[in-house]
């Protein structure tokens, strides 16, 4: 699987999410300290953007703003209803100040 530079680490404030496109598909990039995680940006329940939701840095989750489903940023699994299907998790690495995500 190929990878591509998506943005700089400084482009995502700590504890926030940002929508980016990887291979033409929306992805939520989330920064937690020196870690960056990437999940499919579309909620598996309501088809809204997860990157508009709240990030819990202690629990490593993102909450869908529409109906409140929590998703693990590490596994993509929904932790609360109404969502029952996981979102995709993408491989991310930091190279210097660049965030690199595996292309789909």
Image (tube, helix red, strand yellow):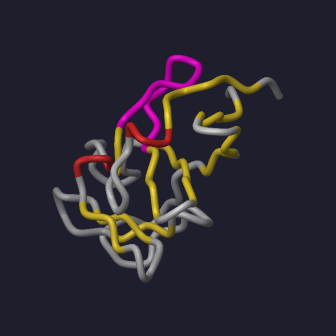
Picture quarter containing residue 45?
bottom left
Residue occupying image coordinates x 65% and y 35%:
101
Q: Nearer the viewer, residue 97 or 29?
A: 97
Q: Main secondary structure of the magenta part?
A: strand
Percent x, y for residue 46? 27, 49
48 sits left or right of 78 in the view: left
Pick out the residue farthest to the left.
66
Q: Is residue 44 left or right of residue 22?
A: left
Q: Is residue 53 left or right of residue 17?
A: left
Q: Residue at x 59, y 34 (%)?
A: 98
Farthest-out residue, right:
1
Report the front residue among 77 and 20.
20
Farthest residue toward the bottom? 58
Residue 35 within the magenta-colored segment of the rendering:
no
Q: Is residue 21 magenta?
A: yes
Q: Looking at the figure, which quarter contains the N terminus?
A: top right
Rendered view: 102 above or below 41: above
Q: Where's residue 15, x and y in %?
A: 34, 62
Residues rendered magenta in the picture: 19-28
């Amino acid at each position: 699987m190929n990878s591509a530079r998506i943005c700089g680490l400084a482009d995502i404030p700590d504890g926030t999410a940002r929508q980016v496109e990887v291979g033409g598909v929306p992805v939520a990039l989330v920064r937690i300290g020196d870690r960056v995680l990437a999940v499919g940006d579309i909620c598996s329940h309501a088809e809204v953007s997860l990157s508009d939701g709240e990030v819990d840095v202690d629990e490593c989750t993102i909450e869908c703003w529409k109906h409140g489903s929590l998703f693990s940023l590490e596994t993509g699994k929904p932790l609360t209803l109404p969502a029952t299907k996981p979102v995709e998790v993408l491989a991310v690495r930091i190279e210097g100040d660049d965030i690199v995500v595996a292309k789909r």
